[in-house]
Image: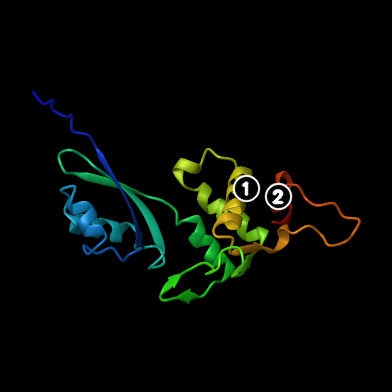
Amino acid sequence: MARKHIARDQIVKLIVGAGQASPSPPIGPALGSKGVKSIDFCKEFNARTAHMTPGIPVPARVTVRPDRSFHFELRTPTTSYLLLQAAGVKERKNKLRGGMAAGKESIGEVSLKHVYDIAKVKQSELRLSGLSLEGLCKSVIAQARSDSKERKLKSLNPPSSPDATPYAFANLSERCFQAC
């Protein structure tokens, strides 16, 4: 005989513009396949994000229970979005986009003050609240460097004087706190 599976909570991860949730794709099909009425989610999501600037991409983690009820938690905007905003990147085709040629093109500059501010925003999230601000700054710096290598951190380059020594990666967060 076939075994019966125990019904478990299902998790759906969505990134939706603040105040712009509608039951059309991608929300409708993602939640509809789990048996949830997407219009209920959209109404609640739009009510919770009414205080935010419309259009900011907000990650939401929806937990669907076996009885088809749901609850969701909102997270802070993605680090790459915050870095693109800090760099002052213009929209292309109604979206913020990085460089077209990875590693060959610089689309903007982000100061250490911006890195610190982004780390403070990310620290307000419950799941990241246990991390140190120094660790979050390092994470934001790494994201800025590795995210298709499109962002150049203006203040992170070593001084150009011949007698100055290059900065070590471990000192980046210290410089971040000193600059802010």
Residue found farthest to the left: 1
Instruction: Characterize the local packing of mark 2: few (<14), some (14-19) or many (20 or more) Cα atoms within 10 angstroms.
Output: some
Verify CB contact (< 8 Å) between mark 2 and mark 1.
Answer: yes
- What residue is rendered at 71% in x and 47% in y? 169
Do we see residue 117 in this rendering? no
Quadrant showing the C terminus: bottom right
Give how far across and how far down residue 93 sits, in percent. Answer: 41, 76
Eyeballing the image, is 48 above or below 107?
A: above
Specify the amino acid type for callout 2. Answer: Leu
Instruction: Characterize the local packing of mark 1: few (<14), some (14-19) or many (20 or more) Cα atoms within 10 angstroms.
Output: many
Specify the amino acid type for callout 1. Answer: Lys
Query: Which residue position holds label 1?
Result: 138
Give how far across and how far down residue 92 sits, in percent. Answer: 46, 76
Quadrant showing the N terminus: top left
Q: Nearer the viewer, residue 32 or 103?
A: 103
Q: Which of the 4 image quadrants contains residue 127?
A: top left
Question: Which secondary structure lies at badge 2?
Answer: helix
Left or right: residue 42 compared with residue 134: left
Residue found farthest to the right: 163
Left or right: residue 150 compared with residue 69: right
Question: Which secondary structure lies at badge 1?
Answer: helix
Query: Which residue position holds label 2?
Result: 172
Q: Which of the 4 image quadrants contains residue 4?
A: top left
Q: In terms of sequence position, does the residue under pointer 2 or pointer 1 come before the other?
A: 1
- What residue is rendered at 27% in x and 60% in y? 26
- What residue is rendered at 17% in x and 53% in y? 32
Q: Nearer the viewer, residue 174 or 43?
A: 174
